[in-house]
């Protein structure tokens, strides 16, 4: 059974109905699957690591350092105001626009992008427009300052929606105990597969499917999780977060706007900030995704892929930290990236060169959502990366 290339793995789409959920999904939840298709990756530490939470405190070595770490953690958790921002207030922005959301620390109004920054961003957007449509939002999660363009332009997001789905499964289903990481998911005969996990009748665990979904952007893992778990409240969750009817109930792969992805990553980031074992595991995987236009735009290498936790309740799982998250010195300062990209090229109907995630510059996390329907290739990747790097540099400089 061969592993598909990145382009093959990410680029496929699924248009089949998930009627299999009712017939087989709940029986699948009763079993514990044999891990037959995914070898856990070895965990390793990373230089410039971001260790926080209980592991960081244990490593501090003194009561004074521990107290300082606790204070720093509290300040960092309080710094993100995403839960208080009205993301509907982000301007629709048919042209490039700067904005500031109420409830943030940017009390002087919208940030002032310099003439050079505006020209650089405009030129990058113009290049994208020669190949497709663009939907762009960047948001400082502390101040509420941001920049947007084509906020509500809907494009095919390809695999970019795998990150919010993984967060949904962990936060809404595994955390409260509705399912566990060891819950078995049976491969339905009613879906179309790429060949990685699409062994009809086989059973894979939530743990290995989530890891394959996030790290390797595996399409089969995405479909199998949907087939088995969507009956447990996925569409209700999606309607509540994104608005009724925004998420297509028929296919896992979504047509989305940057506003939709900002909502998705606001959900992901507020979950990561809880620093639960599972949230931290997700964050570590998002720092090690196998493809990132955001990281490439900023010159940040991928983090080290983590070993999956045994279970949220076991002591061994507490060792899962963000230690492997790569911190890189860039012209913007010290930068870390968590992301999930989507890419597919050469398709008559479905093309995408897209990325969404969080870029932490110094201590400030920025949501970055750059979605386009450009056919994926070297030119479209370079064009999207130019938009990301110029827009983020302009926003950071504006303060």
Image (cartoon, rainbow, N blue to C red):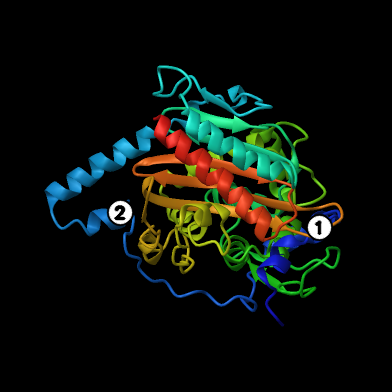
Q: Residue 122, image x and y in percent?
A: 60, 35
Instruction: Identify the residue position indicated by label 1 in the image.
Output: 14
Tell me the tag on residue 304: none
**Closer to the camera in the image, 265 or 359:** 359
Instruction: Identify the residue position indicated by label 2 in the image.
Output: 54
Left or right, 237 with respect to 192, comes to left
Q: Residue 107, image x and y in percent?
A: 40, 18
Corner quadrant of residue 125: top right
Residue at image location 70% in from the left, 48% down from the top: 232
Say which quadrant the C terminus sits in. Answer: top left
Q: CA distance from mark 2 to mark 1?
A: 41 Å
Residue at image location 70% in from the left, 72% down from the top: 203
Corner quadrant of residue 382: bottom right
Crowding at dot 1, Cα within 10 Å, few <14 / some 14-19 / many 20+, comes out as some
Residue 209 visible somewhere in the drawing: yes
Query: Is label 2 or label 1 in front?
Result: 1
Residue at image location 65% in from the left, 26% down from the top: 93
């Amino acid at each position: 059974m061969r592993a598909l290339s990145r382009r093959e793995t990410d680029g496929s789409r699924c248009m089949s109905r998930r009627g299999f959920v009712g017939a087989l999904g709940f029986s699948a939840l009763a079993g514990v699957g044999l891990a037959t298709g995914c070898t856990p990756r070895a965990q390793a530490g990373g230089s410039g690591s971001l260790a926080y939470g209980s592991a960081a405190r244990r490593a501090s070595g003194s009561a004074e350092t521990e107290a300082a770490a606790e204070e720093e953690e509290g300040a960092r958790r309080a710094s993100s105001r995403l839960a208080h921002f009205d993301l509907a207030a982000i301007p629709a922005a048919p042209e490039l626009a700067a904005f500031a959301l109420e409830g943030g620390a940017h009390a002087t109004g919208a940030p002032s992008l310099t003439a050079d920054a505006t020209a650089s961003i405009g030129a990058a957007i113009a290049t994208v427009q020669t190949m497709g449509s663009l939907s762009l939002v960047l948001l400082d999660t502390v101040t509420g300052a941001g920049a947007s363009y084509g906020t509500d332009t809907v494009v095919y997001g390809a695999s970019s929606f795998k990150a919010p789905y993984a967060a949904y499964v962990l936060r809404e289903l595994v955390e409260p105990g509705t399912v566990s990481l060891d819950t078995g998911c049976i491969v339905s005969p009613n879906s179309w597969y790429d060949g990685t996990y699409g062994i009809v009748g086989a059973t894979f665990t939530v743990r290995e499917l989530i890891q394959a979904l996030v790290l390797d952007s595996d399409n089969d893992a995405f479909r199998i999780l949907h087939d088995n778990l969507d009956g447990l409240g996925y569409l209700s969750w999606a309607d509540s977060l994104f608005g009724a009817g925004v998420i297509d109930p028929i296919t896992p792969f979504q047509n989305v706007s940057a506003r939709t992805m900002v909502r998705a990553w606001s959900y992901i980031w507020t979950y990561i900030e809880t620093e639960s074992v599972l949230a931290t595991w997700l964050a570590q995987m998002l720092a090690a995704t196998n493809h990132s236009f955001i990281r490439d735009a900023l010159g940040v290498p991928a983090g080290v892929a983590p070993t999956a936790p045994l279970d949220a309740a076991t002591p061994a799982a507490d060792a899962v930290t963000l230690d492997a998250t790569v911190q890189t010195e860039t012209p913007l300062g010290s930068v870390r990236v968590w992301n999930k990209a989507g890419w597919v090229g050469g398709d008559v109907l479905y093309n995408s060169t897209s990325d969404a995630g969080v870029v932490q510059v110094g201590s400030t996390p920025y949501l970055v959502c750059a979605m386009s329907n450009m056919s994926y290739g070297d030119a479209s990747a370079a064009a999207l990366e130019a938009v990301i790097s110029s827009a983020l540099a302009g926003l950071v400089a504006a303060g």
